[in-house]
Amino acid sequence: MSWKTSKFATSLKSLLTDGAAVSSPDTLTSIRQAMLGSLADLPDTLELARLKAHLKYALDYQALWYMRSDVLHHLAKAHGEAEAWARITELSTLFKEVLPA
């Protein structure tokens, strides 16, 4: 599966959405950095490096939203489920203004 999205797919997606996910690139970058920051204290593994690359090159808010489960998985392995859920809950609040309810 390719992580690149064609201009056609991006244009089609923008026509089909209600525009709620349209926000400044700074917001996308801040959410991306928060997600990467939540993983900063984890030991490096190949699987974690792949997740970080996917986070780094995600094209939109929705892609980052759906990667929360992968982030949760890695956090739970390293810190336990309670700490992982606490971090994910904090990250999830960042999406309130950019994704539809």
Image (cartoon, helix red, strand yellow):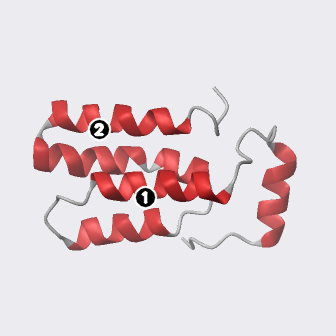
Horizontal side, residue 94 vs residue 52: left or right: right
Assess whether mark 1 and mark 2 are in contact (beta carbons under 8 angstroms).
no
**Which mark is drawn over residue 87?**
2
What amino acid does circle 2 point to?
Arg
Against 57, is 71 above or below? Answer: above
Q: Could you tell me residue 17's position as x and y percent?
A: 79, 42
For the residue pair 8 and 32, the one nearer the viewer reads as 32
On-image quarter of the N terminus: bottom right
Mark 2 element type: helix
Crowd tier of the residue under label 2, counting other residues whose Cα lies within 10 Å: few below 14, some 14–19, many 20 or above: some
Q: Could you tell me residue 23's position as x and y percent?
A: 71, 48
Which residue matches tag 1?
33
Q: What residue occupies the far front of the structure in this picture?
A: 26
On-image quarter of the C terminus: top right
Crowd tier of the residue under label 1, counting other residues whose Cα lies within 10 Å: few below 14, some 14–19, many 20 or above: some
**Which mark is drawn over residue 79?**
none
Q: Could you tell me residue 45's position as x and y percent?
A: 18, 70
Based on the displayed image, in which of its 4 quarters is residue 69 positioned?
Answer: top left
Query: Image point 35% across, 64% down: which residue?
Result: 51
Horizontal side, residue 35 vs residue 8: left or right: left
Against 74, is 59 above or below? Answer: below
What amino acid does circle 1 point to?
Gln
Mark 1 element type: helix
Query: Image point 17% across, 59% down: which residue?
Result: 42
Based on the displayed image, in which of its 4 quarters is residue 4 positioned?
Answer: bottom right
Based on the displayed image, in which of its 4 quarters is residue 60 positioned?
Answer: bottom right
Q: Could you tell me residue 14's position as x and y percent?
A: 82, 52
Horizontal side, residue 96 vs residue 93: left or right: right
Query: Image point 54% across, 59% down: which residue?
Result: 29
